[in-house]
Image (cartoon, rainbow, N blue to C red):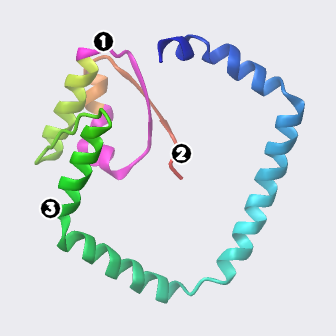
Amino acid sequence: MQVQTMQFKARAGAKLANERLQQKLTKLSTKFVSARASAVLDIDFEAMRAALKERRNRALDNLDVWLETFEREATRRGATVLYAETTQEAARLVAEIARQHDVQKVIKTKSMVSEEMQLNRVLGEMGVQSIETDLGE
């Protein structure tokens, strides 16, 4: 991982200078926007909302099973799963991880979860610069 990280700027620069890749990305971005706009016209939003609500409720009804499954599979793949009962506890866990790794800067997606945790404030108090992106959208 470290080797790739050290080469990131050079690799990114090479890709940004690749004219063919840039043309393809431009074409993709314009096609994506028009295709998405077209697809939205065909959506029955009320039916979709009802189906999604039912799916959400089914997941919540079995949340203990889903959490156990996630933890087991994530752990099997080498991840560490942490649980927090409050937003303050979740922010504290993130702060501990940042402190353990001497983090100076984070890049994260904007989210209501990090807003509710007041994560930017917590990280800022530690001297960690937090940069937010809209990549999650």
Of circles 2 and 3, which is in front? Answer: 3
* Residue that label 3 marks: 64
In three-dimensional space, the C-alpha distance between marks 2 and 1, rounded to whole angstroms, equals 25 Å
Residue at image point 15% right, 40% down: 88
Q: Nearer the viewer, residue 73 or 37?
A: 73
In three-dimensional space, the C-alpha distance between marks 1 and 3, rounded to whole angstroms, equals 34 Å
User: Would you say the residues marked 2 and 1 are in contact, meaning their CB atoms lie under 8 Å apart?
Assistant: no
In three-dimensional space, the C-alpha distance between marks 2 and 3, rounded to whole angstroms, equals 31 Å
Looking at the image, residue 133 sits to the left or right of residue 90; the answer is right
Q: Amino acid at mark 2?
A: Asp
Q: Amino acid at mark 1?
A: Asp
Say few, some or many: other residues with alpha carbon within 10 Å of mark 2 (under 14 / 14 to 19 / 20 or more). few
User: Would you say the residues marked 2 and 3 are in contact, meaning their CB atoms lie under 8 Å apart?
Assistant: no
Residue at the front extreme, as displayed: 76
Mark 2 vs 1, N-terminal side: 1
Mark 1 vs 3, N-terminal side: 3
Q: Amino acid at mark 3?
A: Asp
* Residue that label 1 marks: 102
Residue at image point 65% right, 76% down: 40
The image shows residue 64, relative to residue 80, as above or below, that is: below
Q: Nearer the viewer, residue 124 or 104?
A: 104
Say few, some or many: other residues with alpha carbon within 10 Å of mark 3 (under 14 / 14 to 19 / 20 or more). few
List x then y, in percent, for residue 45.
53, 84
Q: Secondary structure at mark 2?
A: loop
Image: magenta residue range:
100-120
Q: Secondary structure at mark 1?
A: loop
* Residue that label 2 marks: 134
Mark 2 vs 3, N-terminal side: 3
Q: Is residue 117 magenta?
A: yes
Looking at the image, residue 50 sits to the left or right of residue 123; the answer is right
